Image (spheres, rainbow, N blue to C red):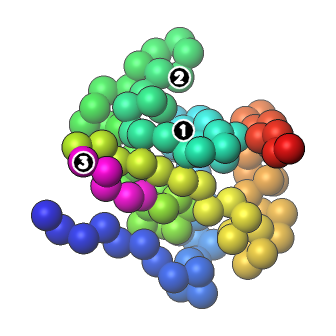
């Protein structure tokens, strides 16, 4: 199995983030991941409410999100676990992710920590 590519924080480019989040489906997927405390599997984010994203499209969306540096993915058996890199990205590009998600009306609620 090929290793997954995750860019280092210093290698992430704003144009890659803007490209990845130029698709409304990817924005919806990313917003769900950013709002989930434990991330989730690819299939757990296929349902966007009014429609379900086909598996082939979903795989491509996660690849674009991962290669742009927005998420970190890890294989666990036959599943792929995904985690938002929102906090890391906010350190590198303060306010960028929040502004994009706000523009789409997709700003997630922060998970509650006790």
Task: Please say if the residues under marks 1 and 2 sit with CB atoms less than 8 Å apart.
Answer: yes
Question: Residue 104: x, y in percent?
Answer: 72, 38
Type of secondary structure dominating the magenta stretch: strand
| SS assignment at label 2 | loop
Outermost residue toward the left in this view: 1
Question: Residue 46: x, y in percent?
Answer: 43, 28
Question: Image point 79% across, 53% down: which residue?
Answer: 98
Outermost residue toward the bottom in this view: 10
**Foreground of the two, 24 or 30:** 30
In this rendering, would 4 be left or right of 65? left
- The disc placed on residue 29 is 1
Question: Residue 36: x, y in percent?
Answer: 65, 40
- In which quadrant of the rendered view does residue 103 lie? top right
| SS assignment at label 3 | loop
- N-terminal of the two: label 3 or label 2? 2
Task: Please say if the residues under marks 3 and 2 sit with CB atoms less than 8 Å apart.
Answer: no
The stretch in magenta equals 73-77
The correct choice, above or below, for 33 with respect to 2 in the image is above
Question: Image point 31% across, 55% down: which residue?
Answer: 75
Instruction: Decide: few, some or many residues near mark 2? Use Cα within 10 Å; few <14, some 14-19, many ≥20.
Output: few
Locate the C terminus and report the quarter of the image it occupies.
top right
Instruction: Decide: few, some or many residues near mark 3? Use Cα within 10 Å; few <14, some 14-19, many ≥20.
Output: few
Give the Cα separation between the discs numbered 1 and 2.
8 Å
Question: Image point 56% across, 15% down: which residue?
Answer: 49
Residue identifier under label 3: 77
In this rendering, would 97 be left or right of 65? right
Instruction: Decide: few, some or many residues near mark 1? Use Cα within 10 Å; few <14, some 14-19, many ≥20.
Output: many
- The disc placed on residue 48 is 2
């Amino acid at each position: 199995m090929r290793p997954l590519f995750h860019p280092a924080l210093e290698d992430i480019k704003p144009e890659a983030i803007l490209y990845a989040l130029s698709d409304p489906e990817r924005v919806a997927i990313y917003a769900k991941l950013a709002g989930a405390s434990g991330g989730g599997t690819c299939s757990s984010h296929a349902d966007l409410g009014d429609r379900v994203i086909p598996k082939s499209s979903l795989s491509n969306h996660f690849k674009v999100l991962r290669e742009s540096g927005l998420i970190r993915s890890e294989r666990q058996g036959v599943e792929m676990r995904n985690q938002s890199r929102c906090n890391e990205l906010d350190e590198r590009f303060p306010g960028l992710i929040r502004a994009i998600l706000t523009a789409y009306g997709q700003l997630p609620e922060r998970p509650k920590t006790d």
